[in-house]
Every structure is written in structure tokens, then in C-alpha cells.
């Protein structure tokens, strides 16, 4: 049996403020309406593109944009984890680290 993990405080704070569907990111799914579908959609995207890396149980997909890219963090008991991305328009062998912290990533979205 795997240990129970909690989502990072930074993510929970973000969802508390924006998770009810405030659309500040047009074309991006992140709200509670979609949260349970995101991982399934991400797995389908990776399979469609024959991407060699697979998602694991400790990777939490928290955002997807227009069905071709998604962002995730590792659930590892950090309050402000690094953010990784998959983008089908970029040729990569592994997931791309896009921010050292979730808070910096979220702030960059408002620029």
C-alpha cells in the first residue's frame, strides 16, 4: 500500500482562489471541473505521440492547454515544488522542467 500524499500548499492556495472556474487562462484547463480528467488526457496525449516516458503516481497533472501540452509537479511533500511540462510541438526525450517552484510558475502566467 502506497503512503498517502498531500498536495502542496502552494497548489492548494492557488486552487482555493482560482479553482472554481475563474477563467484567467483562456484555453487552459485547471479548475475543479477538469481536475479529475487531466491525468487521463495527459496519458492519452503521450500515447498519441509515442512518447517514451510514462507518467507515474507521484506526478500530479494540474493544468492542460488546448489538448497539446500539460504541466505537472511531483507530489513529494514539498510546499512549492518544481514544475514540468510536456508539449507535443517540441521534440523532447524527457519532460521539460519549466520552473523551480510552482509559485514562480503561477506568477509567470500573469505576465
Image (cartoon, helix red, strand yellow):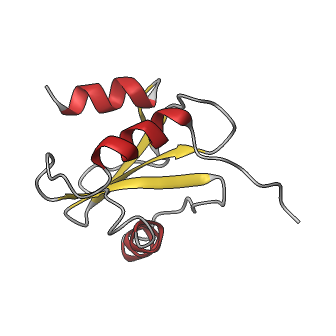
* Quarter occupied by the C terminus: top left
Q: Is residue 106 left or right of residue 1?
A: left
For the point 55% across and 58% down, the residue is 53
Residue 38: where, in percent of width, then height?
A: 40, 66
Above or below, comparing residue 77 to residue 49 in the picture: above
Query: Which residue extends farthest right?
Result: 1
For the point 71% across and 50% down, the residue is 5
Residue 104: where, in percent of width, then height?
A: 36, 23
Residue 74: where, in percent of width, then height?
A: 59, 43
Above or below, comparing residue 15 to residue 29 in the picture: above
For the point 38% across and 45% down, the residue is 16
Of residues 14 and 90, the one drawn nearer to the viewer in this rendering: 14
Of residues 56 and 50, the one drawn nearer to the viewer in this rendering: 56
Above or below, comparing residue 40 to residue 57 in the picture: below
* Quarter occupied by the N terminus: bottom right
Asked where in the image residue 85 lies, by quadrant, the reply is top left
Q: How many marks?
A: 0
Residue 49: where, in percent of width, then height?
A: 37, 70
Of residues 40 and 19, the one drawn nearer to the viewer in this rendering: 19
Asked where in the image residue 32 lies, by quadrant, the reply is bottom left
For the point 53% across and 28% down, the residue is 80
Above or below, comparing residue 1 to residue 8 in the picture: below
Amino acid at each position: 500500500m502506497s503512503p498517502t500524499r498531500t498536495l502542496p500548499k502552494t497548489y492548494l492556495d492557488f486552487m482555493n482562489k482560482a479553482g472554481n472556474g475563474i477563467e484567467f487562462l483562456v484555453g487552459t484547463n485547471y479548475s475543479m471541473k477538469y481536475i479529475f480528467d487531466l491525468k487521463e488526457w495527459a496519458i492519452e496525449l503521450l500515447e498519441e505521440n509515442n512518447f517514451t516516458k510514462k507518467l507515474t503516481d507521484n506526478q500530479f497533472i494540474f493544468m492542460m492547454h488546448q489538448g497539446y501540452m500539460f504541466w505537472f509537479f511531483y507530489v513529494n511533500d514539498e510546499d512549492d515544488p518544481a514544475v514540468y511540462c510536456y508539449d507535443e510541438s517540441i521534440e523532447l526525450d524527457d519532460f521539460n522542467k519549466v520552473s523551480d517552484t510552482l509559485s514562480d510558475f503561477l506568477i509567470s502566467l500573469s505576465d
